[in-house]
Image (cartoon, rainbow, N blue to C red):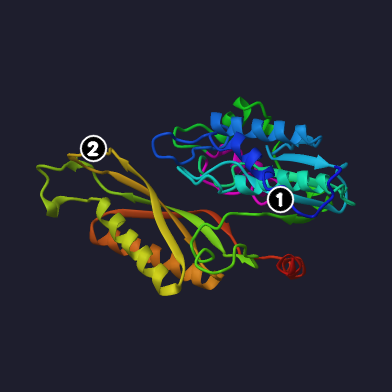
Amino acid sequence: MSDHSTTPDPGAFDRLWADLVSVGRDPRGGGYRRHAWNGADADARAWFTEAAAARNLDVRTDRNGNLWAWWGEPGPGAVATGSHLDSVPDGGAFDGPLGVASALAAVDELRRRGLTPARPLAVTVFAEEEGGRFGVPCLGSRLTAGEISPERARGLTDASGTTWARAMEAAGHDPDAIGADPGALADLDVFVELHVEQGRALEETAHPVGVASAIWPHGRWRMDFTGRADHAGTTRLDDRSDPMLPFAHTILAARALAEEHGARATVARALVSPNGTNAIPSLVSAWLDARAADEAALGAVVAGVREAAERASREHGVDCATANESLTPLVSFAHGLRDRLAAV
């Protein structure tokens, strides 16, 4: 505390990062597999709890599994920063944890300068932000904001059939207590998150940091193509009801529609049954992730994908059903805060 200079300590972040970087990393591919309530997620949460406690922050777990490390007693006018520690399957090292580690490093920097916040300050870790295990993104924050019902959240399942309720309980939390927390939201005045860029647009400019103005509307849709299982070696092509064919048409349509509307559309997850090399499938379940600059463009992409899926299914004697599993509208950030950050 004796050095009150405004030159940051360049090693503060590196020291924090060194203790986290190996947690949940797959030694084969190098990606990260921290998913809600698994062992790697528990280890990452333990890292955060220990690091926050070492800074004399008051660490609390809310009823939705989100972590809050408070500097000052929680109350009206609170300022929060942070991110998440879970990852997409084989995700990158900085996606989420950058915002958490940098927030803790910022606390160190404030203390090094001899500063004390005038308002309550929290470093947060949101649970199941990516939706990598249970399919719905931002689940911890959606529950807190009342944007998903506790009943639906408890019933979400992972690939093995384990429910959110069972996984949460196994991790030592009470799934019966989850739900909206309007009091916590009312106290929270500002939330700022540092996040790694997930593309290359900023990297190809001269600017090391960008300030976002909005989050595109986005969502996830499930598509079930139901055909008829047959032997691949003996069933004539004209006699087949093969769900893989309309599935393939749908993937290509999603790419073409994304290009047409300047959007993003990805089909990256599929389950095939019975999934045998010499068996024509009876069912293909696939998930579409779609995002666009506005609701109209997103709606056009999704409607086009659905139409292409249904048309191709009819042509190949296959049934097609689609369902929306999550949808987030356009989120515009407060312009005043955005402009202040840009000025800094």
The residue type indicated by label 2 comes to Gly
Q: Nearer the viewer, residue 289 or 5?
A: 5
Q: Nearer the viewer, residue 122 or 216?
A: 122
Taking the magenta stretch, the answer to whether it contains residue 55 is: no
Where's residue 27, x and y in %?
A: 43, 34
Up the image or down, 61 lies above or below 110; here it is above
Q: Nearer the viewer, residue 27 or 293?
A: 27
In this view, which residue lies farthest toward the right?
118
* Residue at 29% across, 61% down: 249
Up the image or down, 197 lies above or below 138; here it is below
The residue type indicated by label 1 comes to Ala
* Residue at 76% across, 67% down: 340
320 left or right of 65 in image: left
Element on which disc 2 rests: loop
Element on which disc 1 rests: helix
Q: Quadrant of residue 56?
A: top right
Q: Which residue is mark 2?
A: 276
Image quadrant where one finds the N terminus = top right
* Residue at 71% across, 50% down: 145
Span shown in magenta: 134-156
User: Can residue 309 be seen at all in this image of the molecule?
Assistant: yes
User: Can residue 181 be seen at all in this image of the molecule?
Assistant: no
Number of other residues with Cα within 10 Å of mark 2, as a class: few under 14, some 14 to 19, many 20 or more: few
Taking the magenta stretch, the answer to whether it contains residue 140 is: yes
129 left or right of 61 in image: left
Q: Which residue is mark 1?
A: 145
Where's residue 25, x and y in %?
A: 49, 36
96 left or right of 239 in image: right
Q: Nearer the viewer, residue 288 or 322?
A: 288
Mark earlier in primary sequence (2, 1)? 1
